Image (cartoon, rainbow, N blue to C red):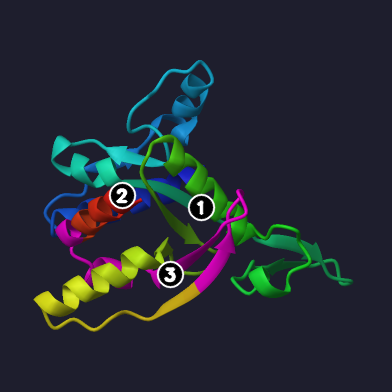
Amino acid sequence: MKGGNFEREIAKELSLWYSKGKRDDLIWRTHGSGGRATQRAKSDKDTKYQHGDLTFSDPCVKELFDVFNFELKTGYSRKTKKKSGNERITNWCILDLIDSKQKVCIFEEMWRQAERDAKKSKRIPILIFRRPMKSPCIVVNSNIFIRLFVSLSLSKENKMPSTHRVSVHLSNGKLVSLTIISLSSFLEWAVPKDFISIGKGFLHDK
């Protein structure tokens, strides 16, 4: 239920972003959060636009989902008991990529899943996550972010939002550079049409 609430929340935010605040119902959850596409894929059947966690509910925003596959994650904190008997909640952290003893840390697992689903649907992976008690963030390929920054810098005065860049090993062993941005900052800064156009160009170049 927690994940479902987060998906509905983000679907509305992305709808308002795309429609410039006019509509909050353009985007909604996929059937079973992508589960239907996974099951049909096992029988070599394609369920277009049902990979990932979000899809379009109005054809006017179909162009966004022609290009991007959205994976949404919330939670994943670890609970431990203190000697007093009280519970302590420990959030996962991006620095787990560097100093965690886990073979594959939570952030890397999230991105690998986003990358796998995007590959199945021949689209670009987008990860939106929210850690417990924190604000949502969006993760995009750094090459796309740089192209978007250049495009927006040329078209209007717009300060680049604060970002954090990390490198992640994919399941196939390749290293990918990712940019992490506060979701609210990204939605305020990025222009949907530019984002889609740059995504199309990125797909063409691959």
Q: Amino acid at mark 3?
A: Thr
Viewer-nearest residue: 81 or 167: 167
Whichever of callouts 3 and 2 sits on the residue coming sooner in the sequence is 3
**Residue 195, percent from left and from top:** 23, 59
Q: CA distance from mark 1 to mark 2?
A: 24 Å
Residue, x 22% and y 75% (percent of image)?
A: 150
**Residue 155, percent from left and from top:** 10, 75
Q: Nearer the viewer, mark 3 or mark 2?
A: 2
Q: Amino acid at mark 1?
A: Lys
Q: Amino acid at mark 2?
A: Leu
Residue, x 50% and y 69% (percent of image)?
A: 134
Local SS, label 2 = helix
State yes or no: discs 1 and 3 in contact (Cβ < 8 Å): no
Q: Residues within 10 Å of mark 1 (few under 14, many from 20)?
A: many
Task: Confirm whether residue 132 shows in the render.
Answer: no
**Residue 67, percent from left and from top:** 28, 46
Q: CA distance from mark 1 to mark 3?
A: 17 Å
Would you say 185 lies left or right of 175 here? left
Q: Which residues are magenta?
A: 166-194
In the drawing, what numbered circle is on residue 73? 1
Q: Which residue is mark 2?
A: 203
Local SS, label 1 = strand
